[in-house]
Amino acid sequence: MKRILVAAAVIRRQGKILIAQRLADKHQGGLWEFPGGKVEEAESVEQALARELVEELGIVPERSRPLIRISHDYPDKSVCLDVWEVSAFRGEPHGREGQPLRWVTPETLAGHAFPEANRPIVSAACLPSLYAISPDQLTLDALLTWADERLEKGIRLMLFRAPSLAREEYCRQAMQLLERCRKAGAELLLHGDPDLLGQVPADGLHLPAREISRYARRPVPADKWLAASVHDKAELLSAESLDANFVTISPVQPTHSHPDAPVLGWNDFARLAEKAVVPVYALGGLGESDLETAWQAGAQGVAGIRGL
């Protein structure tokens, strides 16, 4: 089947996201979706998105950026969804085609029934642009200071990675870090063993690449984030087979800890990100100043240890 290119928008206003319900006589009628439509010949995705938002909602986008690009095959249709985040627009959205609209919080998005192809978009809409990873071998005081500095900067997704710690001490420090995150409205992921979530009620788990192949199915509950570190297409496919919510792809650039190790560079990163069916973070020698480049390369955003 010919793959249909669709431009779609995650439209934000005052902390909420706009979704629309598909009319009953349309493909996947009755399900909720992110507004948008088919890209016509001789149109760019941005042009198509602007046209569709005027036709469907009566609004004109004023500030937007790439969010995620997903291909999906239904039994009767193949689509490529090129999704943009619209953070400013002119006009008041209303269903010009009679479709119901709803402003929802990111936390309640997953409670709505979306077409299968939209599942990664729901994750992307809920994930921030920055993913901070804790350095190993910090004292507890240094770890909490590290976290406080990043929370103060507005970072709302963290990974507690400390392979040098014994399990009991890791859990003890994770509980204190989780308390800091909860107070700031941030989310914390643990690193490594899924059983850690039975001891520390964090928001999810991040699997190192070497651990992905140990599992035949998703090792954490559906209401927790599952992330994974990947470096190539095989690891990416393995992570996706576990129904991971997102991955980090690395190393994009030389890192402080491995300055002479081979790197992907942005071109190879973009080629790998294009194959992903989940949101991806660019990792390795990057910082907040690399966000725009990462977005243009197909990333959700940037992950970092020292750079963030």
Image (tube, grey):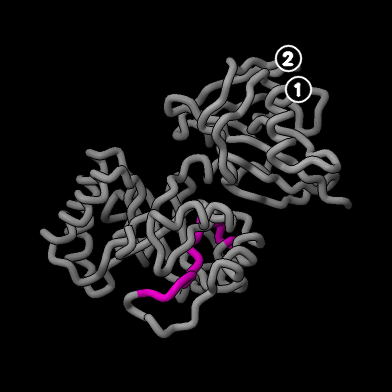
The residue located at (57%, 30%) in the rendering is 62
Q: Position of residue 264 (x, y in %)?
A: 54, 74
Magenta run includes residue 104: no
Of helix, strand and loop, which one carries label 2? loop
Are the residues tagged 1 and 2 within 8 Å (C-beta)?
yes
Answer above or below: position of 43 versus 53. below
Q: Which mark is residue 23?
A: 1
Q: Quadrant of the C terminus?
A: bottom left
Q: Is any atom of residue 245 visible in this view? A: no
Q: Which residues are magenta?
A: 240-255
The residue located at (18%, 59%) in the rendering is 143
**The one of 279 and 228 positioned closer to us in this rendering:** 279
Quarter holding residue 102 = top right
- Could you tell me what secondary structure mostly forms the magenta stretch? loop
Q: Position of residue 93 (x, y in %)?
A: 61, 18
Q: Which residue is mark 2?
A: 98
The residue located at (57%, 46%) in the rendering is 67
Q: Amino acid at mark 1?
A: Leu
35 to the left or right of 161 = right
Answer above or below: position of 55 versus 273. above
- The tag earlier along the polypeptide, 1 or 2, is 1
**The one of 47 and 167 positioned closer to us in this rendering:** 47
Q: Amino acid at mark 2?
A: Gly
